[in-house]
Image: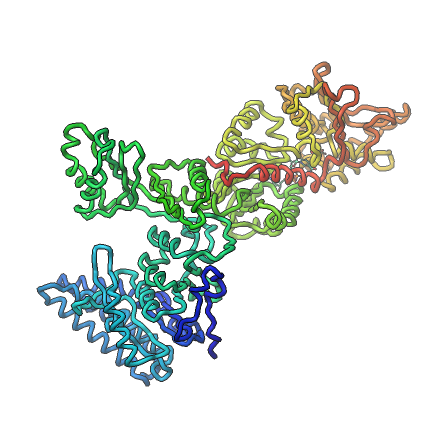
Amino acid sequence: MSSAPQLLGDAVASAATSAVAALRPGGVTRVHKFGGSSVADADRIASLAPLVDDGADVRVVVVSAMAGATNALVAMAAQAAAGQDWSGEWAALRERHLATAATIDPGDRHGLRDAVARDFDGLRDDLLALASATGDTTALVAQVHGAGELVSSRLVQAALGGEAAGWQRLDTRDVLVVQPGEMGVAVDWEASRERFADWRSRQRPAKVVVTGFVARERDGRCTTLGRNGSDYSAAIFANLFDASELLIWTDVDGVLSADPRLVPDATVLPTMSYAEACELAYFGAKVLHPQTMAPVQSRAIPLCIRNTLNPSAPGTWILAENPEGDAQASPVKGLTIVRDMAVLELAGNSMVGVPGTAEKLFAALHRAGVSVVMISQGSSEHSICCVVRASQADRARAAVEAAFADAIASNGTQGVGLTRDVSILAAVGDGMVGIPGVAARLFSALAQAQVNIRAIAQGSSERNISVAIADADATRALRAAHSAFWLSPQTVSIGLIGPGQVGRALLSQLAAVIPKLRANSQIDLRLRGIANSGYMALDHFAIHPAEAVERLVEMSTPAFDPDAFAAHVRAEHLPHALIVDCSGSEAIARHYPKWLAAGIHVVTPSKHAGSGDWERYVAIREAQRSGARFMYEATVGAGLPVINTLRNLLDTGDEIQAIDGMLSGTLAWLFNSFDGSRPFSALVREARELGYTEPDPRDDLSGLDVARKLVILAREAGRELSLDDVAVESLVPGHLREASRDEFLARLDELDAPMQARLEDARSKGLKLRHIAHLSQAQGARVGVVALPADHACCHTRLTDNLVQFTTARYASNPLVVQGPGAGPQVTAAGVFGDILAIAHSLSNGIGAHS
Ligand SMILES: NC(=O)C1=CN([C@@H]2O[C@H](COP(=O)(O)OP(=O)(O)OC[C@H]3O[C@@H](n4cnc5c(N)ncnc54)[C@H](O)[C@@H]3O)[C@@H](O)[C@H]2O)C=CC1
Ligand SMILES: N[C@@H](CC=O)C(=O)O
C-alpha cells in the first residue's frame, strides 16, 4: 500500500525553506537515485520497490549500472581499442545480468532475459566496431561505458512491475543534451528542456525509470556525464521534472562530519546547505558528486542522502539554508582531507607591488593544463603560493619557471619552490561565517597535535578554511580538528589498570555517574581500556564500566602490555587521555613519567610514585610540562581532601610547621575495635576483608603505609624527604617480615600476645592505643603506636577515621584538622574519581595535552 504523498523534506525544512517545500503544480514529484551497490544483484534490486512506493504523484527512479559493471565496461572498451581480447569480460558481465534477469523474471514470462541478451548483443557490436574503428571513437567509447545503465534500468523497471504496473523507461539519450567542456560536462538546458517537454507531451507517465550517466552531445553523438555521473543525471532530471525532492540512495547513512575510516567519532549530519555541500563535495566527501548541487540548487529542490541498507535512518537533507534553530553545536559542518598534493611557491622582491604577477603565474599554469586547488598570498606580495595535484606538480613548476625565466635569471625572484607529499585539510560550514574564533580553534587543535601548517586559505565567504599540511600529518590533523569541533572539550579517553577492591568500586561509581555527567555537563568520560596483571581489554569507542571486568576474561583478550595500553588510551581522535592506576604496583608506577610526557594524565591511589625514588618523583613533576597532570589525592586519607588542603595552605602563602595525626584507616579501625574481646589477628583478617588494608597487610602493620603518606605530605610541603628518613615502629615481628604474604597471613596470631600485652599496659594507665604520625622540622618524621589520654583528639575518632592536623603560621595555636574515614574501597574510589573530575573540569578549550 502506498503512503500519503507527504514531503519528507518538510519535516526538516523550517520556515526558512518553506518555499522549497511548497507543492509543485503537478503534485508531489519525488526522484530517487540508486547507485551501483543498490542494484548490485536481484535481491538488492527487489529491495528497491518498498523504497520507491512512497505515495508521490510522480515517481522517478534514476539508476546506475550494477556495482562493478562500469569498471568492466571501461576495461573492455580499452581492450577493444587496443586490439585485445574482451570476450571473456563481456561473457562474464552478460552472464551476471542474465542471471539477475532470470531471478527477476522467472521463466522469462515477460521477456526480460531476451531483452537483456539483445542489450549485450548491441554491446558486442559496439566493441567489435571499436576494435576496427580508425577515426574518432569518442562516441562509441561513451556508448560502451554507458551500457551498464541501460541494462540496469531495464532490470529495475521489470523488478518494479514493468509496464503492467505503469513503469515506463526513459533512455536519457533521448532527452539530455550536454556539451563536454573545460569545466566538465555542461547541460544544454534549452535543448534538454525542449526534448524533455516533447517526450512528456507524448506520454505523461507517473512512474519512470531513468538511465543515469548517459546523454548526447548537440550533434547527437553519445556521451557520458563522467565517472559518478549518475548523481549528476539524477539532479538534472530532478530539475527537468521540477521535483519536490531528490533522494540519493547509497550505502551510507548520510554525509558524515569526516571520513569514518579515519575518525571513528564522525557523525551523520542531519542537514546542510547547498553551499556547504558544494564545498564538501569539491573537497572530496565521497558521497557527493561536485556537479550534483547546481541543478537542484537552481530550483531549490531539497536533496537527501539515504542508506538503502538502513532505510529507517533519516539521512542528510541538503537544503537552501540550514533550518533555523539548527541545533548543530559546531560551527564547522564537515572536515575533509585531500591527499596527493604539492605546494608551489614563487618568491622574490621583484614581485612586490608589480601588477600582473599573479595573472602571469596562473596563465602559465592554465596553459600547462594544471588545475590550481588552493591559493595563498601574503599582503607583502613577496611570495605567492598555490597547491596543485602531485601528478601535475613537475609540469606546474616547469611552466612557472619558463614564464618567469627572465626574473629568475636576473635574481628578481628566488625561483620556484615545490614541496611534495602535501595534503589539504578543509573545514567547511555556514556556521563559521562571522563567528570569531573558528580559525583559532582549528589552528590550536593542529598546533596541539604538532601539525605544521604550510599554507592557509580562507575565502571571504568564510565558509571554508583550507590548510596545506604534510601528508604524514593528515590523519592526525583530521582527528585533532574533528575532536576540537565535534566533541565536548571535556571528552576524556580513560584506561583503568587494576580492577581490584578500589578499581571495581571506581567502575561502579563511573557506571552510575557517567550518563549524568554527559547529560548535565560537558564531561564525557569514555572508558576505553582496562587491564589487570595478566590481560587488557581495549575498545575503540567505550567499554561500559559495569561490563569492564567481564571483558578481561574474554577468550580473545590480549596479554597486558603497558605501552600498547597507553598508546590505545591516547587516541588521536579524542582530545584528552587519562590512565587511572589502581594496581598498587611499583612496576606500573615506573611508566608514569613517560605517560605524562606523552600528554596522558595519570590519577592513582597508589603511593609508590609519591613516596618512592626521588629521581622518579622529580621526573614526574617535570613530565607535567606537557600539560598532563599527575593527581594522587586518594593516597593520603582516601577520599579526604588532605593533599588539596595542604596545597591550598601553601598556595595562599601559609607555612607548614608540623603535620600530625592518624594516617592509617586500617590501624585506626584496629585500635578503635581492639578491646581485648577478640584477638588482634582476627581483627586484622576482618580489616582485610573489609578492603581497608593494603594488598599485603604488613604494609599497614609495619608502619610502611603511613610512612609513605608522611613522605608524600612532606614532599608536597617542599621537603626532600625519603622513606629512609622516617623513623618507623613496626608491629610485624622481625621473623615474619621476609615471609611470603600467605605464610604471614597463616601466622597472624603470633601478633596476638604482644598486642594484648600492650593493650593491657595502656589500660592500666588509663590510656588508649593509637597509631600516630608526626612531621616537623624540629622532631623529624616518625610513625608508631602511642598510648594517649582518653581526652586526646585522636581518641575521639570512629571506625577508620583519619585525623590530619596541620599546624601552620596561620593555624598556629588552633591547628587545622581534616578528619573522616581514611580507608575502604568506596571512599578511596571517590577520591580517585574526584581527581578525574578535577582534571576534566580543568579542560576547557577542546585541546588535549596530547603532544
Ligand atoms: N583499599 C583502600 O582503602 C585504599 C587503597 N589505596 C591504594 O589503592 C591501590 C589498590 O588497592 P586495592 O584495590 O585494595 O588492591 P587490590 O589488590 O584489591 O587490587 C589490585 C589490582 O591491581 C592488579 N594488579 C596488580 N599488579 C598489577 C600489575 N603489575 N599490572 C596490572 N595490574 C596489576 C591486580 O590484578 C588487582 O586487580 C593500592 O595502591 C592501595 O595502596 C589507597 C587508599 C585506600
Ligand atoms: N591501607 C590503607 C589504605 C589507604 O591508604 C589504610 O588503611 O589507610
Q: Residue 385's spot in the image, x, y percent?
A: 27, 38
As displayed, is residue 743 above or below residue 816? below
In front here: 763 or 721?
A: 721
Residue 795 spot, x, y in % from top left: 83, 29
Q: Where is residue 481 in the image (x, y as percent from the top left)?
A: 44, 43
Q: In this view, does 100 lie to the left or right of 3?
A: left
Q: Nearest the camera: 341 or 503? A: 341
Residue 25, by quadrant, is bottom left
- Is residue 131 in sight in this rendering? yes
Lateral position of residue 759 relative to residue 332, left or right: right
In front: 99, or 405?
405
**Ligand 1: quadrant of the figure:** top right
Residue at x 29%, y 46% (from the top left corner) = 373
**Colour scheme of the rendered structure:** rainbow
* Res 253 seen here: no
Front residue of 490/243: it is 243
Is residue 697 positioned above or below 423 on the image?
above
Task: Quadrant for residue 187, please give it.
Answer: bottom left
Query: Would you say 478 lies left or right of 698 here?
Result: left
Q: Where is residue 86, by image quadrant? A: bottom left
In this figure, what is the number of numbered marks? 0
Residue ranking furthest to the top: 778
Q: Position of residue 642 (x, y in %)?
A: 69, 30
Q: Is residue 549 left or right of residue 262?
A: right
